[in-house]
Amino acid sequence: MALLGLLLALAAVVLTVGVLAANTTRVAVHAFGLTQSGVSLRELFIAGAVTALVFALGLAMMARGLARSRRRRLERRQLVRDSQQQSASLTAEKARLERELEQERARRATAPVSRERTVVERQPIVERERVVEREPGVDGTTGPVVDGGNDRGSGRSRLFRR
């Protein structure tokens, strides 16, 4: 395909050189109600070649625009198809989950009710504590006191530490 394009381009160059070199006569050109006399065939040929290039550029721009529109249209169709497939799969999943829920509800409704309570074991929260010896207080008691980890020894909890 590239070789054919190269051969056509070379043929066009040879034809152009031949036309420009061989034609030196002057003619009158009539276009859109205007007349231009004394135009050489060389100038007329160049004007035609420029007009052909502008026409080819317009065709190329139109082809690219149509290709872009087609690509966007195909992408949109694919997105719609994907969306419909996803919607169908989600609808099927929803129906399956609804069936499972109904089965679970029916199973719970027919199962005997147990009056025993289930004991939930809880893990104790371990905080950093330290034992502080205290001096005899007003009430006369002495012994270890658990302090909440306040390093100042003021007896305030960690909540009020600065």
Image (cartoon, rainbow, N blue to C red):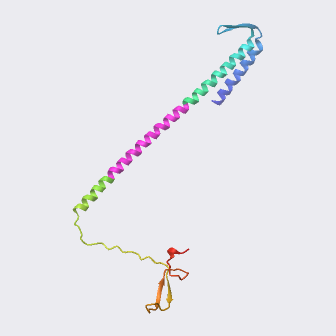
Q: Nearer the viewer, residue 73 or 10?
A: 73
Left or right: where 76 falls relative to 65: left
Judge left or right: residue 24 versus residue 140: right
Residue drawn where x is 58% and y is 26% of the image: 62
Pinpoint residue 70: horizontal percent, then vertical percent. 52, 32
**Vertical placement of 29 versus 108: above or below?**
above
Q: In this picture, which residue range is highlighted in magenta? A: 67-96
Quadrant of the frame with the C terminus: bottom right
Q: Quadrant of residue 104?
A: bottom left
Q: Residue at x 71, y 15 (%)?
A: 45
Q: Nearer the viewer, residue 97 or 127?
A: 127
In this picture, is 69 found above or below 27? below
In-image side of 64 versus 35 (left or right): left
132 relative to 64, above or below: below
Residue 82 lies in the magenta-colored region = yes
Q: Position of residue 64 (x, y in %)?
A: 58, 30
Q: Residue at x 36, y 50 (%)?
A: 93
Instruction: Tell me what residue is drawn at x 69 percent, y 21 percent.
Output: 12
Q: Which SS does the magenta portion mostly show?
A: helix
Name the one closer to the observer, 37 or 71.
37
For residue 93, above or below residue 149? above
Q: Dividing the image into 4 quarters, which one contains the N terminus?
A: top right
Is residue 103 rendered to the left or right of residue 142?
Answer: left
In this rendering, the count of numbered labels is 0
